[in-house]
Amino acid sequence: MAEQSFYQRCVAACGPLWEQAATHPFVKGLAAGALTPRQMQHYLLQDGWYLRNYVRVCRALAARARSEEDRLLFEYSAGISEEAELGIQEQLFKQLRLPWVDEAPAAATTAYMEQESDAVGHDWELVALAAATPCTVLYAEVGRRLALMESTADPHHPYRLWLDLYADPAVQEMAEQWIACLNRWAPGKEKAEQDEAVRAFVAGIQCEIAFWQQAWDAAGTVHVQP
């Protein structure tokens, strides 16, 4: 039997949380194209806050990278968040005719940004990497799964842009590179560092669930700036 990789150890440590994150009701709403305008508005606004912080997190990792391969991965990831993901948000606002309003970071958004920002400055580099990994790998996993569903096959699906981005081969490959990077950094690390990194990964998945739930709970009328 093959030895468990460090990434597999991180996912296993999540227990049921991994599936809970990948199959959250908000994710199912995305697949069905059935989210309320307010749910989608709230999600996009909050994700904008998160992504801008994630760009900083990726660039901080790039500054700590010991190889050119890793540095380029983190810089590329920052670019995807800054250009593709934030760009698609703007397009979705227009397509769905959602008003863009000045909405402050909500509780789950703030907690997630703080969790990653604090961890990326950790003295142990594996902890920094593990904290930032869930975002990329979970969204790629969700994108891959949703692409296989009959409900997402309609070319006129209201969230077509979102679905296509996270199912895109480039995003899938980027997630695989993050996994490979995590598995490269872990060997040789002391047990205490590895254990702390696993906890940081699990905390990231917990933050993802809270982030989905926050958007799912925002089911009221669309918020319009007075």
Image (cartoon, rainbow, N blue to C red):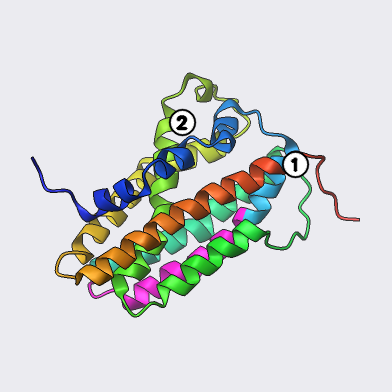
Task: Count neighbours of disc 2 (C-alpha within 10 A) and say few if under 14, some if 14 to 19, many if 20 or more.
Answer: many
- Residue 103 location in percent, x, y? 75, 59
Classified by dominant secondary structure, the portion drawn in magenta counts as: helix
Under mark 1, the amino acid is: Arg
**Which labelled disc corresponds to residue 111?**
none
N-term mark: 2 or 1: 1
Looking at the picture, tell me which residue is in the foreground, 54 or 157: 54
State the quadrant of the C terminus.
bottom right
| 48 part of magenta stretch | yes
Left or right: 218 as drawn, with respect to 221: left
Instruction: Tell me if I can see residue 123 in this picture.
Output: yes
Whether residue 167 is visible to the viewer of this picture, yes or no, is no
Query: Could you say where residue 140 lies in the image, as x and y percent from the top left?
Result: 40, 44
Specify the amino acid type for callout 2.
Answer: Leu
* Above or below: residue 150 compared with residue 128: above
Above/below status of 48 relative to 218: below
- 38 left or right of 90 in image: right
- In which quarter of the view is residue 19 placed? top left
Q: Residue at x 61, y 44 (%)?
A: 213
- For image coordinates 50% across by 22% down, the residue present is 153
In the image, 173: left or right of 221? left
In the rendered image, which residue does mark 1 sit on? 38
The location of residue 70, given as percent across then percent down, is 27, 66
- The answer to whether residue 39 is magenta is no
Q: Can you identify the residue that label 2 sits on? A: 146
Asked which secondary structure carries label 2, the reply is: helix
Mark 1 surroundings: few (<14), some (14-19) or many (≥20) residues within 10 A: many
Tell me the distance, in whole angstroms, between the alpha carbons under discs 2 and 1: 22 Å
At 32% from the left and 77% from the top, the residue drawn is 64
What's drawn in magenta, residue-wise?
47-67
Question: Split into 4 quadrants, where in the image is the N terminus?
Answer: top left
